[in-house]
């Protein structure tokens, strides 16, 4: 990986390289040009899509496949993105927008922006500094980071780099309740004020794109890490846990677990991976302190609904009693504004900050956050909203 990085740096600095065209992401929301020169410094990025090809070059093919994959034919992945185009901003003029406050309070802590860094596993697969680089960028910008159970770095080190209480923990329950409680207690001891229990991957998935990219990777995976699947338990969060016979999730998990979890921790408990009003109602009746509307970035069930389409019914069910966070396909500040207008308390991003990480480490993540924050601020100016409360359903239009 280091040789590859050195070579790419050399290539990027070479006069031969200047002006070599590449195909920019055709993703909806990317600027409408097809050919450009690849950026060579994070500060040159004009939108988050600029990081994607740089990251793709830096990251080993199998890891790139893991990052970009959806499931089956990736229709849920596409739906997440397409949903944002169904809404337009409702422009309002002659509002005093000289001061825009994007801050949001979650469980008593104020963050500078409603854009949250979602839990993504094993970030050293994308850059040697992994979660620590992300933590430093999140700290510098005052934004919330959520750490995966299967992170490459333990919660204590990431909490120290991010600073409490700006780090939440994401829980994969595993197949053993006692293991889940041990993980949660460790995160609580490290100072995390909240845990997000991920419930959208109870029994496997079919990641075709990952398999296709992995076949093109000539390296031997097991030279660096344990084989896929069992590799989860080599991660730092499992260092003092007996993992014999353990699975990362339990197909028999039900809502009772949430009640039991509430009894063993003082942390706020959010449920990550809900998509409908019925489950939102069950979450509240079992004591959940928050909901993350998510389909795992299109990586769980196929031909599902876009999370943006799921959001309104969850918000209507919750009626402001607990925070509702949404993630999936957010690539622009305008996307964030649309989700906030549909009632989200805050929004999460996944792949975009990993593009920044894979491209340039901490400065890349920092620039991704800066770009999205700037775009959100401009979107708020456009709809005449001076703070998040002034972003309402009337800030956007859905044409018939
Ligand atoms: C490579 C990758 C790894 C992920 N790992 C986790 C994880 O460990 N735990 C989890 O709850 N969600 C995980 N997710 C889902 C993200 O938290 C988030 O829901 C999703 O990435 C948001 O969609 P976006 O990538 O389109 O922004 C992962 C997503 C990706 C792309």
Image (cartoon, rainbow, N blue to C red):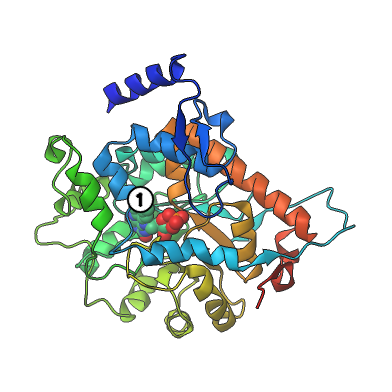
Residue position for label 1: 68
Residue occupying the point 34% across, 80% down: 255
- The image shows residue 158 at horizontal and vertical percentages of 40, 42
Left or right: where 113 falls relative to 162: right
- The image shows residue 16 at horizontal and vertical percentages of 43, 16
Query: Does residue 376 sit above or below 13 in this rendering?
Result: below
Residue 202 appears in the rendering: yes
Residue occupying the point 15% across, 40% down: 221
Figure quadrant, ligand 1: bottom left
| Quadrant (top left/top right/bottom left/bottom right) for the N terminus | top left
Q: Secondary structure at mark 1?
A: helix
Within the image, what quadrant is residue 76 found in?
bottom left
Q: Residue furthest right?
A: 94
Q: Residue furthest left?
A: 244
Residue 160 appears in the rendering: no
Quick one: 76 or 231, which is closer to the camera? Answer: 76
Quick one: 62 or 141, which is closer to the camera? Answer: 62
Query: Does residue 43 sit above or below 83 in this rendering?
Result: above
Residue occupying the point 19% across, 51% down: 233
Residue occupying the point 75% across, 65% down: 90
Decide if ligand 1 comes within 8 Å of the CB at mark 1. Answer: yes
Within the image, what quadrant is residue 322 found in?
bottom right
Query: Does residue 110 sit above or below 133 in this rendering?
Result: below
């Amino acid at each position: 990986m280091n040789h590859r990085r050195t070579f790419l740096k050399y290539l990027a600095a070479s006069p031969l390289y200047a002006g070599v065209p590449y195909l920019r992401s055709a993703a909806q929301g990317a600027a409408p040009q097809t050919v450009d020169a690849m950026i060579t410094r994070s500060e040159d990025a004009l939108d988050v899509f600029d990081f994607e090809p740089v990251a793709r070059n830096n990251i080993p093919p199998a890891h790139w496949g893991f990052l970009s994959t959806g499931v089956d034919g990736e229709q849920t992945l596409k739906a997440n993105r397409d949903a944002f185009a169904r809404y337009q901003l409702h422009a309002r003029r002659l509002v005093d927008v000289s001061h825009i406050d994007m801050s949001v309070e979650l469980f008593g802590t104020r963050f500078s922006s409603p854009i949250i860094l979602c839990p993504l596993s094993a970030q050293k697969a994308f850059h040697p500094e992994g979660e620590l680089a992300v933590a430093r960028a999140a700290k510098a910008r005052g934004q919330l980071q959520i750490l995966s159970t299967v992170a490459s770095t333990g919660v204590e080190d990431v909490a120290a780099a991010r600073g409490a209480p700006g780090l939440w923990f994401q829980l994969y329950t595993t197949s053993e309740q006692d293991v889940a409680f041990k993980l949660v207690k460790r995160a609580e001891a490290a100072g995390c004020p909240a845990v997000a229990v991920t419930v959208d991957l109870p029994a496997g998935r079919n990641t075709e794109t990952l398999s296709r990219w992995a076949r093109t990777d000539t390296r031997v995976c097991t030279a660096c890490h344990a084989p896929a699947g069992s590799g989860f338990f080599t991660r730092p969060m499992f260092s003092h846990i007996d993992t014999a016979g353990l699975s990362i999730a339990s197909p028999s998990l039900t809502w009772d677990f949430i009640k039991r979890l509430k009894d063993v921790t003082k942390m706020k408990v959010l449920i990550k991976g809900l998509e409908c009003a019925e489950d939102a109602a069950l979450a509240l009746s079992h004591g959940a302190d928050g909901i993350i509307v998510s389909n795992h970035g299109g990586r769980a069930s196929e031909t599902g609904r876009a999370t943006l389409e799921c959001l309104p019914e969850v918000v209507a069910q919750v009626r402001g009693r607990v925070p509702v966070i949404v993630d999936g396909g957010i690539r622009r500040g305008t996307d964030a504004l649309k989700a906030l207008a549909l009632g989200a308390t805050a929004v999460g991003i996944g792949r975009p900050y990993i593009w920044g990480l894979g491209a340039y480490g901490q400065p890349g993540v920092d620039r991704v956050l800066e770009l999205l924050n700037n775009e959100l601020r401009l979107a708020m100016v456009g709809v005449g909203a001076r703070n998040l409360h002034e972003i309402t359903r009337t800030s956007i239009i859905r044409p018939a």
